[in-house]
Image (cartoon, helix red, strand yellow):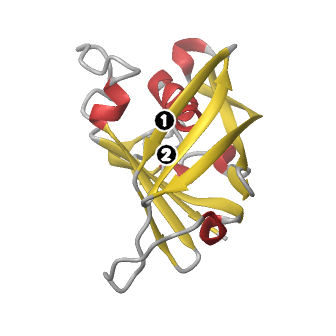
Amino acid sequence: MKLINYYLVLVFSILFLSCDDDDNSTQTLSQNDIQGEWFLSELNASQPVDLNNDGISTINLTQETDCFDEMTINFENDTYEFTYPKIEFTGENDQSLVCNNALNVGTYILENGELTATTMIDGSTSTESVMIELNNNQLKFTITSTQVNEYLDLSTTDNENADLEFLEFIFVK
């Protein structure tokens, strides 16, 4: 479960995007297409997770805790603000969740369907990219196991989340 905390940190540090519309035709997107504030509606894992230790597992992590309720991305001109939860596991055997909102600010560009975000993280500059889908008022992107493994070691046998293949983020306007 501690790995979920690292996933959330990963999200704000690797905010990358490219887009297509819902009619399957090629569309050239501009930064104007993603301008505004986006609110997280779903955070889906490739397999069910019991983040809150209540004995019930689900793939939609927003159903596991209200920590994600304030998660937003706001795109304005060439900058973005990302509000995300910093989740800490506390108590005996990390049975409890403590959530505190954090804010990450950076710049981005949208070129040839790819959004590249640059952010200062712990005094270092991080520049990353990710593919997204943009359908009406829904912005969706997925962090794959390959991307996650660039930052985290999921191969350890004692990691209960080692089989996660992806995390899918769905934001709405």
Residue closer to the observer: 9 or 98: 9
User: Residue at point 34% right, 33% down?
Assistant: 147
Q: CA distance from mark 2 to mark 1?
A: 6 Å
Decide if residue 139 is in sight here: yes
Q: From this view, report whether residue 124 is shown above or below residue 106.
A: above
Residue closer to the observer: 40 or 111: 111
The residue type indicated by label 2 comes to Phe
In the image: residue 142, left or right of residue 77 = left
User: Which quadrant would the C terminus be assigned to in this image?
Assistant: bottom right
Q: From this view, report whether residue 155 is shown above or below residue 31.
A: above
User: Residue at point 69% right, 65% down?
Assistant: 35
Question: Could you say which disc has been placed on residue 46 in the image?
Answer: none
Task: Give the residue furthest to the bottom.
Answer: 23
User: Residue at point 43% right, 61% down?
Assistant: 113
Give percent across and percent down for residue 172: 61, 68
Considering the numbered disc 1 on the image, is that residue within a helix, a strand or a loop? strand
Give percent across and percent down for residue 17: 48, 52
Asked if marks 2 and 1 touch (Cβ < 8 Å), the reply is: yes
In the image: residue 119, left or right of residue 152 = right
User: Residue at point 61% right, 34% down?
Assistant: 118
In the image: residue 49, left or right of residue 79 = left
The residue type indicated by label 1 comes to Glu
Q: Which residue is mark 1?
A: 128
Residue closer to the observer: 84 or 1: 84
Mark closest to the chain's N terminus, 2 or 1: 2
Decide if residue 53 is in sight here: no
Q: Which residue is mark 2?
A: 16
Considering the numbered disc 2 on the image, is that residue within a helix, a strand or a loop? loop
- Which picture quadrant has residue 158? top left
| Disc 2: CA contacts within 10 A as few (<14), some (14-19) or many (>=20) | many
Give percent across and percent down for residue 138: 54, 71
Give percent across and percent down for residue 121: 65, 21
